[in-house]
Image: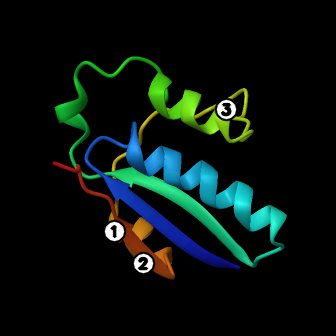
Amino acid sequence: MNKILFLCIGNYYRSRFAEHLFNWLAVKQELNWLADSRGLALEQGVNNVGPISRYAAEALAVRLVNLPDDEQFPLPASEQDFQSATRVIALSVCE
């Protein structure tokens, strides 16, 4: 199984959206890929409430992507995350 790692600052908006959308599409297309996501500076998300942004959750719902009932809270990136990833994609804020 190939693994893709999506990165953003807080693992709350962009990387979580990308992780769930990618996994949903990978299952539909029967791809041998699994996505995960992490954050590089979780401390910057002091106002983040809950495991995932409501905006990300709403955008996924519009696309009929269901979130698991036990959705994890944001996680910081570790060396192991980078070593186990086949590909790493960093997501940036659009300005």
Position of residue 92 relative to residue 17, above or below, is below
Category of crowding for the residue at label 3, using alpha-carbon neighbours closer than 10 angstroms: few (below 14), some (14–19), many (at least 20): few
Q: In the rendering, at what x and y percent does residue 20 appear?
A: 61, 49
Q: What residue lies at 73% left-to-right and 36% top-to-bottom? A: 66
| Residue positioned 33% across, 22% down in the render | 48
Q: Where is residue 7 in the image (x, y as percent from the top left)?
A: 36, 58
Residue that numbered label 1 is attached to? 79
Left or right: 53, with 44 as reference point: right
Question: Within 10 angstroms of label 2, few (less than 14), some, or many (20 or more) residues?
Answer: few
| Residue 91 circle label | none
The residue tagged with tag 3: helix, strand or loop? helix
Instruction: Please state which amino acid type lies under the numbered disc 3.
Output: Ala
Marks 1/3 in contact by CB < 8 Å: the verdict is no
Pointers 1 and 2 in contact (C-beta within 8 Å)? yes
- In this view, 22 is above or below 46: below
* Mark linked to residue 61: 3
Left or right: where does residue 60 sit relative to residue 55?
right
Q: Name which of mark 1 and mark 3 comes first in the sequence.
A: 3
As helix, strand or loop, the secondary structure at mark 2 comes to helix
Disc 2 marks which amino acid? Gln
Residue 70 higher or lower than 93, as above or below: above
In 3D space, how far apart are the residues under numbered discs 1 and 3 (Cα atoms)? 32 Å
Check disc 1 and report its element: helix, strand or loop. Answer: helix
Name the front one of labels 2 and 3: 3
Q: Nearer the viewer, residue 78 or 60?
A: 60
Which residue is painted at 61% across and 38% down in the image? Answer: 60
Q: Mark 2 points at which residue?
A: 83
Expressed as whole percent of the image width and height from the top left, the position of residue 5 reads: 47, 66
